[in-house]
Image (cartoon, rainbow, N blue to C red):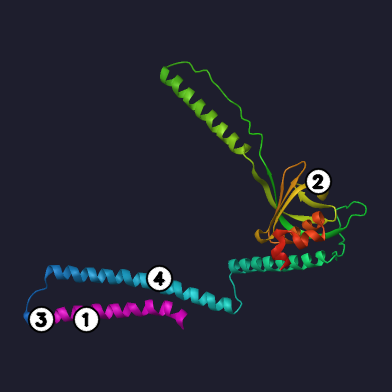
Amino acid sequence: MRRHLTWILPLALIPIAYIALRLVFTAYGENDADSGASMDLGYALLLLAALGVWLVGTIYLTIKAITNAHRVFRSFRRGKGHYTRTEQAQRDLQLHYEDSWNKAQALTGQLSEGHLPPAMQVWGVVLEPGENLHLQITADYARFYGSPGTYVHTSGFFWGQPAFVLAGMGVTALSNNSRRRSAEAASRQHWRDARRTAMFLTDRRILCQVDGRWLSFYYSHVAACYPEPENNSVVLEFHQGDPLLIGGPEAPLAAAYIVWALYGANGLTSHPALGSLRG
């Protein structure tokens, strides 16, 4: 009942305010009839202002009541399992995160006890002889690098009136400055090429398709590993090549498997970043 008061009270205030305003009008009219005096202009303007305030208040309270009633109705519908498209998408995403987290915890326990997941059969992707595929996920892919940041400096020869020459030189200088700033911004290192793609985690490498090319990231080439399952991400640095980011709901699964591939079962039981997955 408390939830319904959020829309019932605004609606109830509308007739209450109207009745109060009518009582004021009626009382003033009776006083004028008894005294025989005409309505004072100032008081008439005050009553008119009060009526205007009531009208504005009525509109505000009506909107407030409709908004709160819609919230109560949507809450009731959600309680019955009926969701809008946006709500259903958000719910599905939340369930995906929760399901992936539970699977990551189970995988952490399984690998730490020395039990490998069964090798998966994959068609289309050709594995190396003796290579086993244990995990297939859909994840966010990105690489950390900067572009060369070069630009072409232009200059021009302007002939004519001084004003024309100065204007031409100014436009050229502004154009060069704009290109230089764009080149400097492009040269800064940050995460680039972000996209969602399928990733195959084998006992030797990570395979993923980017721009129509299959890329391989071998564990033997990894120089540093930064798993953050609670932030749904894993960052890998390599002896050669740009760092790799693996993110998204299924990233905790990749974090558990990659830590096992790099450090073995001991990494799963002692790595400080995997404490939540061990729990």
Which mark is drawn over residue 221?
2
Mark 3 vs 1, N-terminal side: 1
In contact (CB < 8 Å): disc 4 and disc 1: no
- Asked which secondary structure carries label 2, the reply is helix
Which residue is outermost to the left? 36
Which mark is drawn over residue 195?
none
Residue beneath label 4, please?
63
Q: Quadrant of residue 186?
A: top right
208, above or below 21, in the image: above
Query: In the shown orientation, is residue 167 left or right of residue 265?
Result: left
Q: Nearer the viewer, mark 3 or mark 1?
A: 1
Mark 3 vs 4, N-terminal side: 3
Whether residue 25 appears in magenta in the rendering, the answer is: yes
| Mark 1 burial class by Cα count in 10 Å: few <14, some 14-19, many 20+ | few
Residue beneath label 1, please?
23
Q: Nearer the viewer, mark 2 or mark 4?
A: 2
Question: Is 118 or 30 nearer to us in this picture?
Answer: 118
Residue 272 drawn at (x, y percent):
71, 59
Quadrant the C terminus occupies: bottom right
Q: Which residues are magenta?
A: 1-30
Which mark is drawn over residue 33?
3
Mark 4 vs 1, N-terminal side: 1
Q: Residue at x 45, y 81 (%)?
A: 2
